[in-house]
Amino acid sequence: MNFRQIEAFRAVMSAGSASRAADLLQVTQPAISRSIAELEKDMGFQLFDRVRGRLVPTAEAHLFFRDVESTFQGLDRLRMSAARIRDFGTGDIRIASLAAMGSTLVPRALRLFRERHPSIAVTLQVAGSSTVRELVMSSRFDVGLVADEIDVAGLEHQLFATPKAVCAMPIGHRLCERKVVTPADLHEEQFIALSPEDTVRRRLEKIFETSNVRPRVVAETPNSSTVCALAMEGLGVGLVNPYATDGFGPSRLVFRPFSAAVHFRTLLIFRPDLPKSRIVRDLASCLLEARNARAERLGN
């Protein structure tokens, strides 16, 4: 079995006939027929029935074609990668981020990065922290931003940000009158909670327990941005990462500081198989610059 035979088989399956496959590959029809016959001999089963001079795919051919297509898709990805390297010189860079920063801070950092490296193609994927970890750990992505509950064994990582939680509430809510929301204010309040595995939620539950506070959890979600969206619809109040609040102006939601020391710890992680390139270091610098600019703008 060789590439020429597989290419001829794929062309026949895609084009529908040996003659059109020959035109597609710019070879003769006998060459296509010969390649198919050799492939069938090598594989030990028939791929086509010969019906009135036509090649009619067998059930085995359709099964085999699925794997052939997936292989050629891999080749297409290699061609795309080669084209990016040819067109952009140094290829591309891939960053994955948790939702709280993926739609706010990271786009600002990528704007800075593109201003300095206009020839570099950038891929951004927003996902849960565990997914981001797997993308970076498997070397499919170069840089990641994750919450601190993930296992960082085997990854190069550094602390990126520790913003203090803020309380999100719908406009007109009784707590809007408070300058600062305390744990006691949330007693028996309809509460939108983060997922049970979230370290912020675990810290908050300890504070509630110590203060003998029992909010009424009406919804759970892993993302601060979703907490904001649910609060905006009047489902209740919730504690969120302040980086997730940028898309919600004062006409949509009210945010108040939370008195207890509850912080969202975000880590910057890097793929473990290669030393950081200059481009990766530059992207990390842009992320830090965007973080510092936001902190300066908000005075924290």
Image (cartoon, rainbow, N blue to C red):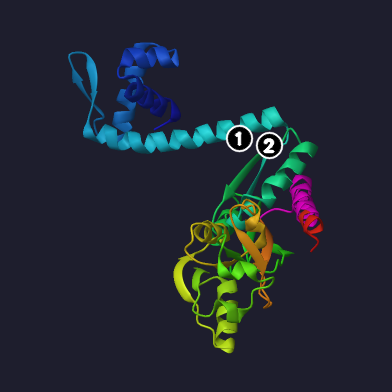
Task: Using a 10 Å C-alpha cutoff, classify the residue at mark 2 as few (fewer than 14 neighbours), some (14 to 19) or many (20 or more).
Answer: some
Query: Between marks 2 and 1, how big is the CA–CA gap?
Result: 7 Å
**Residue under the point 51% across and 32% down:** 76
Q: Amino acid at mark 2?
A: Gly
**Considering only vertical position in the picture, is 13 above or below 270?**
above
**Residue under the point 50% across and 78% down:** 215
* SS of the residue under disc 1: helix
Query: Percent from the top left, x then y, of residue 110?
Result: 71, 44
Residue topped by disc 2: 91
Is 275 colored magenta in this rendering? yes
Residue 272 seen in render: no
**Considering only vertical position in the picture, is 240 above or below 83?**
below
Residue topped by disc 1: 81
* SS of the residue under disc 2: loop
Query: Percent from the top left, x then y, of residue 261?
Result: 69, 77
Q: Which residues are magenta?
A: 273-293
Residue 241 falls left or right of residue 21: right
Task: Using a 10 Å C-alpha cutoff, classify the residue at mark 1 as few (fewer than 14 neighbours), some (14 to 19) or many (20 or more).
Answer: some
Task: Return the residue found at the far left.
Answer: 52
Q: Quadrant of residue 30?
A: top left
Is 158 colored magenta in this rendering? no
54, 217: nearer the viewer: 217
Q: Amino acid at mark 1?
A: Ser
Q: Quadrant of residue 265?
A: bottom right
